[in-house]
Image (cartoon, rainbow, N blue to C red):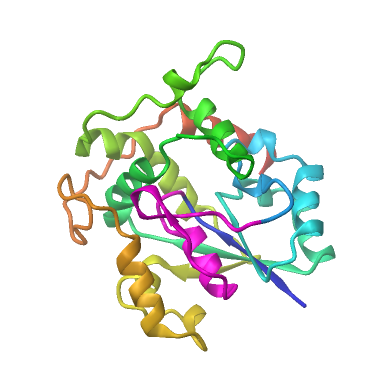
């Protein structure tokens, strides 16, 4: 049986989508975030830094996953043919969730609100690794208090500058090995073919519950005025370097 990897960025409801497609019960936690699927392995596919997603880690997930759909963050590594060979060997296809620049702010705000690290559980180890890296903390010295330092105020300019360059790279990183699905078709007009055969009313109800309780700075403004420039930052610099060296 062919299995599918849902490739998405934080803030685009990937765990919610995978649970629904796997006919699993939805589990909402803080800020209307969906709890990741209960699995007996570490989902290395959610690592943000492509240098850490080794072939062995990639293969471990493919070999141990028992669900039809498994969530993954940006799979820059699939520009490397060795990863594509593993996908073919284990009979996986990638479904890539794409969105337009007008959604960048909503996606980023949702990511900020839903990915604050709090009590670390075993199935949240990837959240911990990614949070330490994003915050530029020293693994030898960081404390939970520093890690849990909240964003005091969301500013539209900060939101745009923190991820727009990465989102631009993400939506440009497509190839023939990926099935493309549209953010609006899944979460706004509910017309995606991916939803065929499922209870559409149930899906609409889950999506409505999944939005953050937040108003302002362009969140859920579906036609915002957005800057044309996507300035690079430390995160996008790492990604561009990886693509240049491995793509």
Q: Point out residue 204 in the picture as x, y percentages from the top left corner.
A: 34, 76
Q: Quadrant of residue 160?
A: top left
Give whichever of 27, 17 is nearer the camera. 27
Decide: is 165 above or below 198: above
- Which quarter of the figure is the C terminus placed in? top right
Q: Point out residue 241 in the picture as x, y percentages from the top left corner.
A: 58, 31
Residue 73 visible, this orientation: yes
Decide: is 64 above or below 235: below
- Residue range in magenta is 10-38
Give whichever of 48, 125 is nearer the camera. 125
Q: Residue at x 40, y 80 (%)?
A: 202
Q: Residue at x 74, y 66 (%)?
A: 66
- Which quarter of the figure is the N terminus placed in? bottom right
Decide: is 153 above or below 218: above
Q: Residue furthest bottom?
A: 197
Q: Point out residue 127 in the picture as x, y percentages from the top left corner.
A: 54, 38
Q: Point out residue 221 in the picture as x, y percentages from the top left corner.
A: 19, 57
Residue 191 visible, this orientation: no
């Amino acid at each position: 049986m062919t299995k599918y990897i849902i490739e998405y960025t934080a803030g685009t409801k990937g765990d919610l989508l995978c649970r629904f497609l796997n006919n699993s019960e939805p589990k909402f936690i803080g800020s209307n975030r969906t709890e990741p699927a209960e699995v007996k392995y570490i989902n290395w596919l959610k690592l943000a830094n492509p240098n850490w997603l080794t072939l062995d880690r990639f293969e471990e997930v493919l070999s141990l996953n028992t669900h039809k759909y498994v969530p993954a963050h940006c799979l820059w590594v699939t520009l490397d043919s060795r990863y594509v060979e593993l996908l073919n060997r284990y009979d996986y296809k990638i479904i890539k969730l794409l969105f337009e620049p007008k959604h960048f702010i909503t996606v980023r705000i949702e990511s900020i609100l839903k990915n604050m690290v709090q009590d670390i559980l075993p199935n949240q180890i990837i959240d911990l690794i990614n949070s330490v890296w994003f915050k530029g903390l020293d693994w030898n010295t960081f404390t939970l208090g520093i890690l849990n330092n909240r964003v005091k105020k969301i500013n539209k300019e900060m939101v745009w500058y923190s991820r727009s360059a990465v989102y631009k790279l993400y939506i440009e990183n497509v190839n023939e090995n990926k099935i493309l699905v549209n953010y609006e078709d899944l979460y706004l007009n509910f017309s995606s073919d991916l939803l065929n055969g499922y209870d559409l009313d149930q899906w609409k109800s889950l999506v409505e519950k999944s939005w953050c309780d937040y108003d302002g700075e362009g969140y859920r403004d579906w036609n915002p005025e957005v800057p044309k420039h996507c300035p690079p930052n430390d995160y996008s610099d790492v990604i561009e370097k990886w693509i240049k060296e491995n793509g």
